Amino acid sequence: MTRRELGELEAALLRLKSVRDELAANLMTLGVKKMESLEKRLALVQTHLVERALADNSKTPLPTHAEVALTIRDARAVLNLNQAQLAERLGVHFATVSRWERGVLSMRRSTWKLLLKLAAEGRRE
């Protein structure tokens, strides 16, 4: 995916957030007070879109289980997240994060790239 396409994707996500805010305001007038499920769904969609944008067919080798485990631990420390929170950001189940962190499970290339991106953003903050 090109930088231009990523820019368009980010713009589309901003438009979605704007629509979400309008919807939330309308729902509040109707007495709907809990937006958590809508927020979670939007976050999952956003994670899925970013994951797809980062996916490629490169032949670079995936990291070892030990590298994944170390990177997961470091990313959680940098981002100050528990396993469940990181799992939500990556769009996976918390048990999957636990398995990665213990070096039991391998990781998809797209998820690996997303993890690296999240960790890099956390370091910048």
Image (cartoon, rainbow, N blue to C red):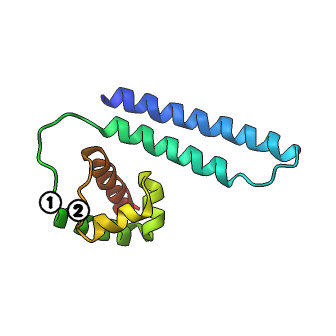
> The residue under label 1 is which amino acid type?
Thr
Please tell me the numbered disc located at residue 64. Answer: 1
Residue 66: name its quadrant. bottom left
Residue at the spot 34% in from the left edge and 63% down from the top edge: 123
Residue located farthest toward the right when viewing the structure as drawn: 30
Task: Find numbered disc 2 in the image and state the secondary structure of the residue it sits on.
Answer: helix
Q: Are marks 1 and 2 in contact (CB under 8 Å)?
A: yes
**Which residue: 23% across, 56% down?**
106
Q: Indicate the secondary structure of the residue bearing disc 1.
A: loop
Q: What residue is shown with label 2?
A: 68
Percent position (x, y) of residue 53? 35, 35
Q: CA distance from mark 1 to mark 2?
A: 6 Å
* Residue 34 picture location, percent across and down: 75, 55
Q: Residue at x 31, y 66 (%)?
A: 99
Q: For residue 21, which quarter of the picture? A: top right
Q: Nearer the viewer, residue 15 or 68?
A: 68
Kind of residue at disc 2: Val
Q: Quadrant of the C terminus?
A: bottom left
User: In the rendered image, is residue 74 in sight?
Assistant: no
Height in image: 47 above or below 75?
A: above
Left or right of 92, for residue 114: left
Q: Is residue 60 left or right of residue 27?
A: left
Q: Position of residue 108 (x, y in %)?
A: 27, 48
